[in-house]
Amino acid sequence: MSIHEFDVVVLGAGPAGEVFAGYAADAGFRTALVEQHLVAGECSYYACMPSKALLRPAEVLDEARRMAGVKEAVTGGLDAGAVLARRDEVIHNLDDSTQVEWVERKGISLFRGSGVICGEREIRVDGDVLVADRAVVIATGSSASIPPIPGLGEVPIWNNRQGTTAEHLPESMIILGGGPVGCELAQAWASLGSEVTLFEPEARVLAHEEPFAGEQVEESLREKYGVNVMTGTGVESVEDSGGKITARTKDHEYSAAELLVATGRRPRTDRIGLESIGVGSGGPLETDEQYRVKGHDWLFAVGDVNGRAPLTHMGKYQSWIGVQALLGRDTDNLAEKIGSPRVVFTNPQVAATGVSLAQAEQDGIDAVAIDVGTESTAGASFVGKGTGGTCRLVVNRSDELIIGATFTGFEVAEWIQAATLAITGKIPVGELRHAVAPFPTRSEIWLRLSEKWEAQSTAG
């Protein structure tokens, strides 16, 4: 058995893990990275990147068909085979060699295999033991959560991995779960020609976002993409019925060629040796504001594994905070306090940051919503014309600070950063009137929001 000594050992090379390793190496720490599958992890190969590659073609086609002078040149529909081939190009055909080159350029030592904590500051990887003089970082991510539905464990299912990397177009598909993953994949496969039925036990899809967001996405899935959306409906059992999978609800049954489960994620904290250091496994790891695991100042947990903000960009942010802590810098964890930005890449897109109006009210905040139509600018004459959408700011009445924002509509994802900056910078909503947006851009939506605030303030 070989023993290797480092300053920092990172277990898991997904987005959070590789970013922690990169920042640590840049700071001069001798760094090791342990990964049993693909460097860059779930988001790059089985989630964010391939799903967007599947979604984008239909959105471009829709926009072309809305544009006079262009729509006349558009003939036919999507080429599913070409879309899947482009998806494979985006995920590098599940080859992580370019990411490995990046790791090597950083001077990081990569160990391939299943890492297991075998004692304080020690990780065993097959025949090697990695000793961390400064810190061990757990960045093992999350796996698809499978709900306890009778029969589900006895039939072949897809999770996000099969749902984003499948090599064939299913004739039909049942999707369990109307969250971001379920909605995105329902739209993606329906746009390519699959017959899709989506079940969501809650009253609407995207139940954690503003009500109008879920309502608009649900309408689009039904009307534009032909998805059979079953909200307020839970699946009570499933079974394999002669080459197809049948899902039964209280009153009906539905059959399809494939069953995709998109009902959430669970942190990967089992089978990594946590019991050897007296830490419980199976659930999210509890950390402090610097992402140190409670009771172990040498142990960090970043990304999905801590359950705090399971989004790729937040995992990267957590890694930056963690490395700052290693350098002795007490950095305020502001992003989590204000609420992480998030985007659902459906059509319409849903881009949000901070809190919703309902969340603010639940927190006891005297908040007010400012709503304007996404198409209320001159710029909407050129991009996404006729697609609708809603833009909302949530404002704390006591200090007039923006505490939340939600934008829906065609290609609004890039807008959310401006709202995030306003919240992070604690800019009073009235001050936004001085941030003049150029005409005729769609960013004049901020002018419309400012005008609406002025009107509401004057009236109230």
Image (cartoon, rainbow, N blue to C red):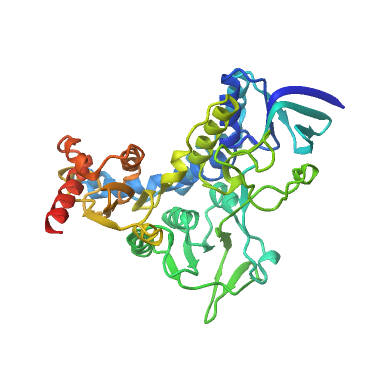
Residue 159 location, quadrant? bottom right
Residue lying farthest bottom? 251
Residue 187 location, quadrant? bottom left
| Res. 85 in view | no
Q: Is residue 379 above or below residue 245?
A: above
458 vs 209, nearest the viewer: 458
Q: Is residue 424 above or below residue 23?
A: below
Q: Position of residue 344 (x, y in %)?
A: 41, 50
Q: Is residue 419 above or below residue 257?
A: above
Q: Position of residue 208 (x, y in %)?
A: 43, 59
Image quarter in which the N terminus is found = top right
Q: Residue at x 40, y 62 (%)?
A: 362
Residue lying farthest right? 1
Q: Position of residue 325 (x, y in %)?
A: 57, 30
Q: Residue at x 43, y 63 (%)?
A: 205
Residue lying farthest front? 398
User: How many discs appear?
Assistant: 0
| Res. 2 in view | yes
411 left or right of 205?
Answer: left
Q: Residue at x 69, y 47 (%)?
A: 269
Q: Position of residue 226 (x, y in %)?
A: 39, 64
113 left or right of 67?
Answer: right
Image quarter in which the C terminus is found = bottom left
166 vs 163, nearest the viewer: 163
Q: Residue at x 62, y 57 (%)?
A: 145
228 left or right of 423?
Answer: right
